[in-house]
Amino acid sequence: MMRSNWRTPLVVLVCSGAILTLSLGVRHNFGLYLQPMTVDLDWTRQTFAFAIAIQNLLYGLATPFAGMIADKYGPPRVLIAGTLIYALGLALMSFSTTGWEFTLSAGLLVGIGVACSGFSIVYGAIGRAYPPEKRTMALGVAGTAGSFGQFIMLPYGQTLINLIGWQQALLILAVTVLLILPLSAALVEDKQAQAAQFHRQSIPEALREALGHSGYVLLCSGYLVCGFQLMFISVHFPAYLIDQRMTPETGMAALALIGLFNIFGSYFWGWLGNRRTKKYVLSVLYFTRAVAITIFIALPVTPLSVYLFGATIGFLWLGTVPVTNGLIAHIFGVKYLSTLGGIAFLFHQVGSFLGVWIAAYLFDSTGSYNLMWLLTIAMGVLAALINLPINDRQIVRPVAKPA
């Protein structure tokens, strides 16, 4: 694939990883704000959780459209626009005093901003930069960068809250995400060279093909469960631990451990997906998550059990992302990887919306998260089962011939 000399696959991978570190690292801070904001502003947890649930839903809804634009015009344009929207949303979160203001800033603006700077956008660039035999591994390496962002940005965010308060901390985070802007220059692609390589197919044709493929529908359905589990834990776990008489620092440390072990997990699952049948790798991952959650809620909650759970669930955290995108690329090719990966991610974010909101509803209704933990386990087992019958045969396409 033709590209400027300095935009080698390694440079694309490193800059993509840095973008995910910033974009996803900042996003994972929001669970730290639930307790201080609801107390200071006299909100219920549903008020806060609804806005974050809307964020996850908008993140999912906007991702396919952002992916289509990135596939057609290149990732940098999407990254620049999305980063500016992301920073604006964070800044307006700082000044929110009502639930509607918070939903507009944290929900609408941040949701769109993250969609334009998340996995699907950079994964399309990485997928086109690397050959098939190295692709899933490269996606896994980029996933570790997003995990590293969670690991370093959570202590960063908690320190800001402790030192200057949650309002000023949000303004600092708004400035932090602007570092994505210069990094986006590395993802410029030669669209004319790509047109000579790829099979002629329009975006509507690619969508009809994928949505009519039973394996793709099953894969997306399993991805919904992934979002349900992850965002429930991301947003509600710190508050759950406070309810169990743990300190806020314990919750922060647990989330940081999730990010730390996610670094190893994303690499491992990406490596495994490169060497084993991807649908079976996904099934094992989902089932192992369900087992880990079952063991955690069956034992007394202590700092040790919290840290062990954080490490274990972190190892299983984002391993689904490189394997899912790798499977999509294997079946359908990489020309519209951002688009098809974005639609799969829409399912993921519908699950995220449900996970955040249902957890808050069940807590406010019952006074505990017990029912939510049980539901999370059951859905993990379901996801493990529905990945097994996926038709993962590669669709063979003729390579476009130069004129």
Image (cartoon, rainbow, N blue to C red):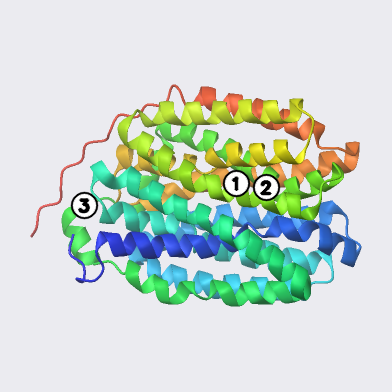
Q: Residue furthest left?
A: 403
Q: Amino acid at mark 3?
A: Phe
Residue matched to label 1: 258
Residue matched to label 2: 254
Among the two numbered marks 2 and 3 on one chain, the one whose residue lies closer to the N terminus: 3
Taking the spot 76% from the left edge, 27% from the top edge, the residue there is: 299
Among the two numbered marks 1 and 3 on one chain, the one whose residue lies closer to the N terminus: 3
Residue 186 location (% of width, % of height): 33, 70
Residue matched to label 3: 198
Taking the spot 52% from the left edge, 69% from the top edge, the residue there is: 82
Residue 281 location (% of width, % of height): 43, 29
Taking the spot 51% from the left edge, 44% from the top edge, the residue there is: 318
In terms of image quadrants, where is residue 363?
A: top right
Secondary structure beneath disc 2? helix
In front of the other: 271 or 34: 271
Q: Amino acid at mark 2?
A: Ala
